[in-house]
Amino acid sequence: MPLQPEDVRRIAHLARLAITDEEADRTLAQLNDILGMIDRLQAVDTSGVEPMSHPLGGAQRLREDAVTEHPDREAALRNAPASRDGLYLVPRVIE
Amino acid sequence: MAVPGAGWEVVIGLETHVQLSTASKIFSGASTAFGAEPNAQASVVDLALPGVLPVLNRGAVERAILFGLAVGATIAPRSVFARKNYFYPDLPKGYQISQYEIPVVQGGSLSTWVTPRGGEPYAKTVRLTRAHLEEDAGKSLHEDFAGLSGIDLNRAGTPLLEIVTEPDIQVADVERAALEAVAYARELHQLVTWLGISDGNMQEGSFRCDANVSVRRPGGPLGTRCEIKNLNSFRFMQQAIVHEALRQIDLIESGGTVVQETRLYDPDRDETRSMRSKEDAMDYRYFPDPDLLPLEIAPDQVEALRVKLPELPGAMRERFAREYGLGDYDCALLTTTRASAQYFTATVAALGAVAGDRGAKSVANWMAGDLAAALNSAQRDIVDSPVSPVQLAGLIARVLDGTINQKAAREVFAALWAGEASDADALIEARGLRQISDSGALEAMVDAVIAANPKSVEEFRAGKEKAFNALVGQVMKQSRGKANPAQVNELLRARLGG
């Protein structure tokens, strides 16, 4: 089933993207084109084929459990618009 | 009036976030130590600065495997990290790295004992759905910032194992259902600390339980569930589940319907309240994290860890009951922590086979009695006990062979605790605590006490048992606590014709 205009608005909201109605219309058409292509891919018989999560071969390399980084807090805090007592300050968020 | 919730079945599944005891974070080399200055342990990876990449910590993977082995789960030969997308200021990347479709630990189960109020204990097994690795988020502080929130990202990236159960708690009794959930949580807490994969500190957030609660008519279809968060103590957990189940029952009985939502427990008011409404229900848009390749675990890596798996608390409880004839209470107490179980077995071993079951029971009594009290008041852990297993065994051996009585033994214990000597024998000699079991000497004392206390003698003969105890006390006093109490009893009864 093709996406509806409200799907696009919902997805945009989840990604915190502000889009105009015009952009929403254009995006809706593009997304439905992409989904149409995926529908064609779905038609291929993949029974017996392992699902692929990554396009690269190989497995995750692990690092030893050791403390190797000693962050420079002041340097990091200087990037923030506001900070106090070593904390980053953001607009109040309470659910 | 009917019992609250009568005619309803409560169904519970649990999700527990366990912080793993690694030194460094799951994807960065920053420290995980609790209580550091705000943001002092937030590395560039934890801060999600542009261009950084996560590198998985072997220690976190090994802890997950150990857990899986302990619960009889399947260790996935290949599992996949996924991004769970949502926006919150304490999650700088805009997504949490977690596992979704293929978790590292699959299946397994955990068994525990449930003791209902005034009822017989019964065994309860809860099946596990999965346990997966993920990263913790930072913390938001909402006080004192003049309308702003403060963000501390020290916790961001701390490794978590999220352990999810099947909805296997299904009980037609609200209190009992909550009790089973708490029993499971306690068992899980004991297991992760026993394995050493977490410090289990609930105040510091190392062990956090969420409960999915729903109600239904017995045999009917499952009801709509609510997730209760903020269960940071076992007591709150019990109260919150009871409260939430009764809230749902009331709601349905008065014609309403339960809405699927997340609710927060407020212990001060003993109520749950809605945290997230349905309108903005979370849609996390999971997808495999392209920054992390699949985690592959070879069979030989699993076997290498299986060898390191300690004897588990459940198995140990059964063994203590079987080998030493100890009761359920003692067995449970001795296996509260792995350290206390080790102390017990070391003491029994030092006591040697001669002492047998009586020796083991004696060790259990000392550990639950004077040792527990001393550790408690000194706020020390049993691993730091000033009285070693060998010293305690030396003391118990002297009680069992009749060298000293219980009263003197407590004095010796206190002296060993204070470090006044290195073994019980030295103290017994130095303080002349050897028990008087010489019947000639005891008889003389008994006769003297009888002669000096005609009133007590008379009262005893008139049937007052208390008067007898007073006379025993007098003899003990005369002997400066060193008389063999059993012998004194026997001699007095013989003399008084009682």
Image (spheres, grey):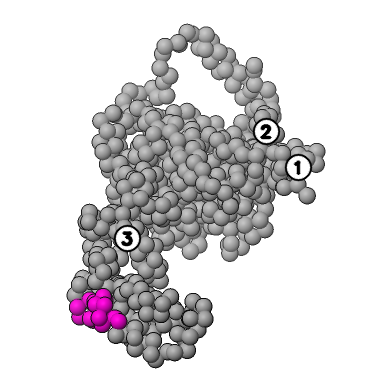
CA distance for labels 3 and 2 = 47 Å
- Comes first in the chain, label 3 or label 2: 2
Viewer-side label of 1, 2: 2
Q: Residue at x 67, y 53 (%)?
A: B271
Q: Residue at x 61, y 39 (%)?
A: B171
- Tag 2, which chain? B
Magenta stretch: give its range.
B428-443
Viewer-side label of 3, 1: 3
Looking at numbered disc 1 in the image, what kind of residue is underneath it? Answer: Leu
Q: Decide whether residue A3 is among the magenta residues.
A: no
Res. A7 visible in picture: yes
Residue B144 location (% of width, % of height)? 58, 64
Residue B162 location (% of width, % of height)? 46, 41
Query: In front: B145, or B140?
Result: B140
- Tag 1, which chain? B
Q: Residue at x 37, y 87 (%)?
A: B449
Examine the image and state in which quarter residue A47 appears: top left
Q: Which residue lies under the disc numbered 3?
A: B363
Callout 3 and callout 1 share a chain: yes
